[in-house]
């Protein structure tokens, strides 16, 4: 089993948007998790481990936690979060996961978010767009790694990179993207993504 790294600190990178990250020697890349506090719920995206004190501070007075997975590759530390926080877990394609609720393919809106499938990327790849602020939380489709910059996921990790590029046009309206690897993208993230080759 691959060990998921544990981050020790959380930073607020946008109003009500939080990030924690840690380098994974197994994956040879930094893994990034985000959370959005909205309507008394902490919405967590692709969680990696987080030190107990930081997790408690992040959770604060919020009573409910929901976890959203952006692909089949990003289960990460979901079991720990579910156990420690009694969180609900959602994914577009929860194949092989225990106790994960499948997002309804016919209803694109859920709990303040619109989910957008990013076909051509890893299995079940999806971005969650927050209706109130044009913020998007993504997985691997677009990465923004230090020393490399903003790029579409390399061919070897895609099921069909051309299809993925077409699907990314569906993010043209977003202002900020918070990816699962690397720094935030924005403002005008949709335009920046559309210009990628």
Image (cartoon, rainbow, N blue to C red):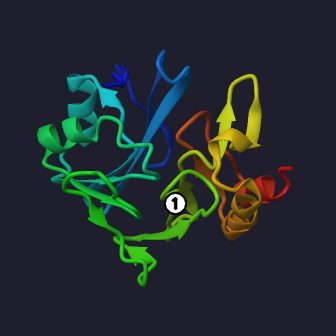
Is residue 60 among what the camera can see? Answer: no
Q: Residues within 10 Å of mark 1 (few under 14, many from 20)?
A: many
Q: Is residue 3 left or right of residue 193?
A: left
44 up-or-down from 146: above or below: below
Q: What residue lies at 34% left-to-right and 58% top-to-bottom?
A: 94
Which of these two is toward me, 163 or 88? 163
Which of these two is toward me, 40 or 1? 1
Q: What residue lies at 28% left-to-right and 27% top-to-bottom?
A: 54
53 up-or-down from 124: above or below: above
Which of these two is toward me, 91 or 94? 94
Is residue 62 among what the camera can see? Answer: yes
Q: Is residue 161 left or right of residue 87?
A: right
Which of these two is toward me, 172 or 93? 93
37 up-or-down from 57: above or below: below
Q: What residue lies at 62% left-to-right and 35% top-to-bottom?
A: 183
Snapshot quadrant of residue 112:
bottom left
Q: Position of residue 100 (x, y in %)?
A: 25, 58
Snapshot quadrant of residue 102:
bottom left
Q: Position of residue 152 (x, y in %)?
A: 73, 46
- Residue marked by disc 1: 126
Q: Position of residue 195 (x, y in %)?
A: 85, 55
Q: Position of residue 84 (x, y in %)?
A: 13, 37
116 up-or-down from 59: above or below: below
């Amino acid at each position: 089993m691959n060990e998921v790294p544990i981050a020790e600190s959380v930073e607020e990178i946008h109003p009500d948007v939080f990030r924690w990250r840690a380098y994974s020697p197994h994956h040879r890349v930094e893994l990034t998790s985000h959370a959005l506090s909205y309507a008394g719920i902490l919405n967590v995206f692709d969680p990696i481990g987080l030190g107990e004190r930081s997790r408690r501070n992040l959770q604060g007075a919020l009573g409910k936690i929901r976890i959203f997975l952006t692909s089949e590759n990003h289960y990460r530390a979901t079991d720990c979060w579910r156990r420690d926080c009694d969180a609900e877990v959602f994914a577009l394609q929860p194949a092989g996961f225990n106790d994960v609720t499948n997002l309804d393919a016919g209803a694109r809106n859920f709990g303040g978010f619109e989910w957008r499938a990013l076909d051509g990327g890893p299995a079940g790849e999806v971005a969650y767009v927050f209706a109130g602020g044009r913020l998007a939380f993504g997985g691997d489709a677009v990465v923004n790694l230090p020393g490399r910059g903003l790029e579409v996921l390399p061919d070897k990790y895609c099921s069909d990179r051309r299809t993925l590029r077409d699907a990314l046009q569906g993010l043209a309206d977003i202002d900020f993207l918070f990816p699962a690897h690397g720094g935030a993208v924005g403002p005008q993230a949709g335009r920046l993504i559309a210009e990628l080759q």
